[in-house]
Amino acid sequence: MTVEENAIKCFTNRANEAAKFISECALEDGFIHVISHLDCDGLAAAGIIGKALWKLNVDFRVRVQQWVDEKIVSDIASDKPALTILTDLGSGYLDVLGKHLTNHKIVILDHHQPVGEATPNILEVNPHLCGIDGSKDISGAGVAYFVAKALDETNKNLACIAIVGALGDMQDKYEKRSLGGLNESIVKDAIDSSCLKVEKDLMFFGRETRPIHKALAHTTTPFLPGISGEEGKSWAFLESLEIPVKIGDKWRALRDLSEEEKQRLCSALSDHLVSRGYAGNVLSLVGTVYVLVREEPWTYLRDAREFSVLLNSTGRLEKAGLGVSICMGDRGEALELAEEILVEYRRSITEYLSWLSAEPNRIEELDNIYVVHGGDFINEKVIGTLSSILSTSLSHTSEKPIIAYAAVAEEDVVKVSARTLDVLTNKGLDLGKIMREAAEELDGKGGGHNIAAGAQVPSKNVNGFIKLVDRIVKKRMEQIAAGS
């Protein structure tokens, strides 16, 4: 048996063990408490486990959180559920959980780097424990999916939700922005369940829902200089190629273009990028598209990446229940309300980006990192989204990690979100370890993946934290350059 086969066997055994444990608790007719993270991946994971528990006809409650703290631990202790399941959360809080909940049954379904050791009352399913990369090979929703499938084979129809979670967590790191590793087996399940179609196409956000010129203008990955953010110029660009934006009174989406029109558009965009000095972005024009064929055309749920943004918006704007409901199958009022939230979310992102660009000192370049000073203006729940967007645009200037922070309302702490590039993680830079080291030295808590991580730090220590991260990144890059 190969190393990879052993790793997969290790992981599936853990998933099967967790499924058996959950099933036994369900037979005891006890109340189950599900706690999940508020981002797309966390909501997808909660929806998958929620649907699986619903099929078991067990009483459960879903609670969505940004992190685990002593208040949440205290609530679990006072609620005394028969079982607590943490999805897309937990592995970074083993010390807190183990210290205060030793008499409680806990299942952790997570993909973040574990910090500490699980106590005997905690059953942890995490790919890192089996030598599998949780930053790109499987997401929190994927871990939840493996357990749900082990509970009941018919839960394979939840595979598409796991794919949405993985894409929301930006795990499309393989060739042509495809999903790989354990995610690839989830894609196969989704195709076998007749709910997914995988295509190669131009990578414009809104290929299912937006007129072509709007899809072009709102595309930031890849960044299209002179087109991204410019609807008028996008329209003119399409007109110059004799590609109609509408036929009669009907707008055309990217999916409506003929293959010849797509090829013509792709060729023209390639020439445009090269002429503007962005030749490296040409390879990002075409990628892998995941179409959820059971969802209605012209809806936000048809394209898995658009679905992921919809979910993320509900979690970030404190309407996570809508996202979980949609993942569990609600296509009525919950979806209508979520679409309204998405409009608000996009508006707020645009407002925050404009605010950041209005003053040069709000985005600061240090020797080894960029710093985004969100302060009290930016909602700390969307600072991660902003850091992801900015990492794409700032990377054209310099290959440096981005550290963005915003104050947490009514608490004397800041939320920090860090992002870096594949080129740096491939060399060995690990933001998760850097965030944890710097935060713990300054009375905070941090962790995450090598490419995307976060921290919570006392407000009084934020300047010291930034300086420390800058020093640690410099030291680590010097070590990498020296081959150590």
Image (spheres, rainbow, N blue to C red):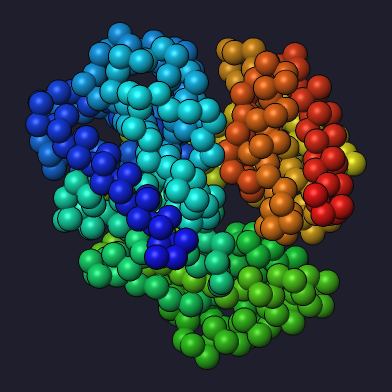
- Residue 78, image x, y percentages: 30, 8
- Residue 306, image x, y percentages: 45, 56
Image position of 381 (left or right of 378): left
Which sits in the foreground, 6 or 17? 6
Which sits in the foreground, 220 or 350? 220
Image position of 19 (left or right of 239): left
405 up-or-down from 76: above or below: below
Count of residue discs: 0
- Residue 249, image x, y percentages: 42, 73
- Residue 418, image x, y percentages: 67, 39
Q: Residue at x 33, y 23 (%)?
A: 121
Quadrant of the rendered structure where residue 381 is?
top right
Q: Is residue 190 visible?
A: yes
216 up-or-down from 10: above or below: below
Q: Is residue 44 visible?
A: no
Quadrant of the rendered structure where residue 98 is?
top left
